[in-house]
């Protein structure tokens, strides 16, 4: 017999996505999800085999949506550096909007939560592979200098993307913190700040390091 729909499974998944950043793998309970979705706990067990299976679907649904958007940017027609700029813009936007979810996944994986660790193993190589492939394409086109792939990948992550994740977490709340919040917004999180970091990073990637720089790198 087919299960009654009423989109209850999607309501539960949406609740899981709302609650996960605050509660994490350990704190996210069936009761909390059911209460947030406005359904009886029995409906959770009707649609999902276990809390772990539910968490896997919550995280994978989130990631697959982001990955589809990133793939579209990376694989679109056009010059590789223009597509790389678009990919970095998108990832930065995701980090700014969903930083709480991403930080929670990282914390859960570091704490040894099996669902988070399996999620990281399965998915982190996917978007890194897209970006590294695009950088290789740019190198073949002569748009960037030859570099070891992880050297330039770590440079982009550290110089362009990581500040968004860090600053969005450190941005203070409340009237007393407004001056610092404004500085962070303007100098790290604003579109202008992001474009400036991307410009600096792409400029750096176009030139080969000197022998002296390599010796000290």
Image (spheres, rainbow, N blue to C red):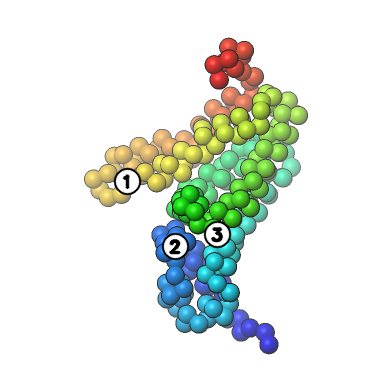
Counting from the top left corner in percent of width and height, residue 96 is at 47, 48
Nearest the camera: 88 or 9? 9
Q: Is residue 105 visible?
A: no
Left or right: where does residue 160 sit relative to residue 131? left
Q: Are marks 1 and 2 in contact (CB under 8 Å)?
A: no
Foreground disc of the pair 1, 3 = 3
Coordinates of residue 83 in the picture (x, y in percent) = 66, 39
Q: Position of residue 61 (x, y in %)?
A: 59, 61
In three-dimensional space, the C-alpha distance between marks 1 and 3, rounded to whole angstroms, equals: 31 Å
- Could you classify mark 1 by the number of other residues whose Cα lies within 10 Å: few (under 14), some (14-19), or many (20 or more)? some
Q: Quadrant of residue 136?
A: top right
Q: Residue at x 43, y 37 (%)?
A: 188
Q: Is residue 30 visible?
A: yes
Quadrant including the N terminus = bottom right
121 with respect to 169 (left or right): right
* Residue 32 marker: none
Which residue, given by chain and number where applicable, does mark 3 sit on?
115
| Of callouts 1 and 2, the N-terminal one | 2
Residue, disc 2: 26
What residue is pinned by disc 1? 172
Task: Please state the horizontal and vertical placement of residue 121, each as a whole percent of the image.
Answer: 61, 50
Q: Residue furthest bottom?
A: 1
Q: Which residue is depicted at the point 43% across and 42% down? A: 166
Q: Earlier in the sequence, mark 2 or mark 3?
A: 2
Relative horizontal placement of residue 81, taking residue 173 as reference (left or right): right
Q: Is residue 167 left or right of residue 48?
A: left
Precedes in sequence: disc 1 or disc 3: 3
Helix, strand or loop under label 3: helix
User: Judging from the image, what secondary structure is the residue with disc 2 in?
Assistant: helix
Name the secondary structure under disc 1.
loop
């Amino acid at each position: 017999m087919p299960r009654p729909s009423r989109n209850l499974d999607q309501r539960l998944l949406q609740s899981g996505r709302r609650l996960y950043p605050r509660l994490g793998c350990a704190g996210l309970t069936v009761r909390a999800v059911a209460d947030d979705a406005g359904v009886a706990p029995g409906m959770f067990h009707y649609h999902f085999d276990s809390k772990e299976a539910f968490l896997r679907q919550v995280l994978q649904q989130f990631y697959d949506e982001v990955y589809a958007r990133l793939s579209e940017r990376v694989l679109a027609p056009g010059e590789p550096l223009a597509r790389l700029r678009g990919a970095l813009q998108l990832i930065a936007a995701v980090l700014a909007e969903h930083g709480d979810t991403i930080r929670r996944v990282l914390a859960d994986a570091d704490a040894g939560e099996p669902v988070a660790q399996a999620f990281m193993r399965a998915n982190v190589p996917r978007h890194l592979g897209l970006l590294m492939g695009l950088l290789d394409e740019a190198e073949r086109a002569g748009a960037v200098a030859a570099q070891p792939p992880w050297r330039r990948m770590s440079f982009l992550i550290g110089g362009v993307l990581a500040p968004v994740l860090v600053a969005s977490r450190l941005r203070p709340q409340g009237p007393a913190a407004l001056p610092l919040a404004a500085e962070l917004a303007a100098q790290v999180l604003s579109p202008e700040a992001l474009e400036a970091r991307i410009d600096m990073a792409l400029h750096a990637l176009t030139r080969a390091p000197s022998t002296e720089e390599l010796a000290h790198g």
